[in-house]
Image (cartoon, helix red, strand yellow):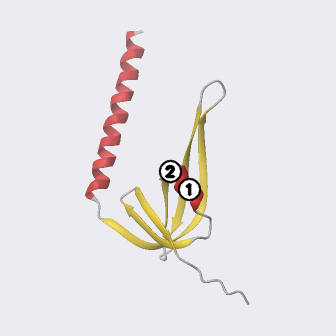
């Protein structure tokens, strides 16, 4: 039982250290704003059944160079974006900061 306890505590400490390193690395990166297009959206649901479930939301953006990158977003932001949207993506390292959609002028003729 003691060995299992030590393993669980070790994994917990490892996860905390990994999160701190990622947070620090993102803070050292410049804040960038670049044109991008929403190419895919996906969710990942965990839990459920007899426990409560939670969802993670991801969006893949494509840059003019053809490169793509995926960011994790909050549910509210995820719901506001649609595949095919184009605009200005703001990010810092692997941290999503925002997306400003291009406004399209509709002609009613």
Name the mark on residue 3: none
Q: Residue at x 55, y 77 (%)?
A: 103
Mark 2 closeness class: few <14, some 14–19, many ≥20 residues within 10 Å: few
Q: Secondary structure at mark 2?
A: loop
Q: Nearer the viewer, residue 97 or 12?
A: 97
Report the number of discs. Answer: 2
Relative to 32, residue 105 above or below:
below
Residue 74's disc is: 2
x, y (%) of residue 72? 49, 52
84 left or right, relative to 73: right
Name of the residue lying farthest toward the right: 109
Q: Residue at x 45, y 68 (%)?
A: 89
Q: Residues within 10 Å of mark 1 (few under 14, many from 20)?
A: some
In the rendered image, which quarter contains the C terminus?
bottom right
Q: x, y percentage for residue 30?
A: 29, 64
Q: Position of residue 39 (x, y in %)?
A: 59, 66
The residue tagged 1 is 78
Task: Locate residue 4, reporting x and y percent.
Answer: 42, 15
Furthest toward the top, the residue is 1
Q: Secondary structure at mark 1?
A: helix
> Image quadrant for the N terminus?
top left
- Residue drawn at (60%, 61%) of the image: 40
Q: Are marks 2 and 1 in contact (CB under 8 Å)?
A: yes
Note whether 86 is above or below 76 in the view shown.
Answer: below
Place residue 91 in its image quadrant. bottom left
Q: Point out the residue furthest to the front here.
A: 108
Q: Nearer the viewer, residue 75 or 2?
A: 75
Q: Which is nearer the eye, 97 or 62? A: 97
- Residue for point 41% across, 66% down: 90
On screen, 97 above or below 89?
above
Mark 2–mark 1 distance (CA, rounded to whole Å): 6 Å
């Amino acid at each position: 039982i003691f060995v299992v306890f030590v393993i669980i505590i070790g994994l917990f400490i490892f996860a905390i250290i990994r999160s701190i390193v990622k947070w620090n690395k993102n803070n050292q990166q410049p804040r960038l704003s670049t044109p991008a297009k929403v190419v895919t959206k996906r969710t990942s649901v965990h839990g459920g059944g007899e426990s409560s479930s939670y969802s993670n939301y991801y969006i893949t953006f494509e840059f003019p160079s053809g490169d793509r990158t995926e960011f994790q977003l909050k549910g509210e932001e995820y719901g506001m974006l649609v595949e095919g949207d184009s605009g200005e993506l703001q990010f810092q390292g692997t941290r999503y900061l925002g997306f400003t959609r291009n406004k399209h002028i509709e002609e009613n003729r």
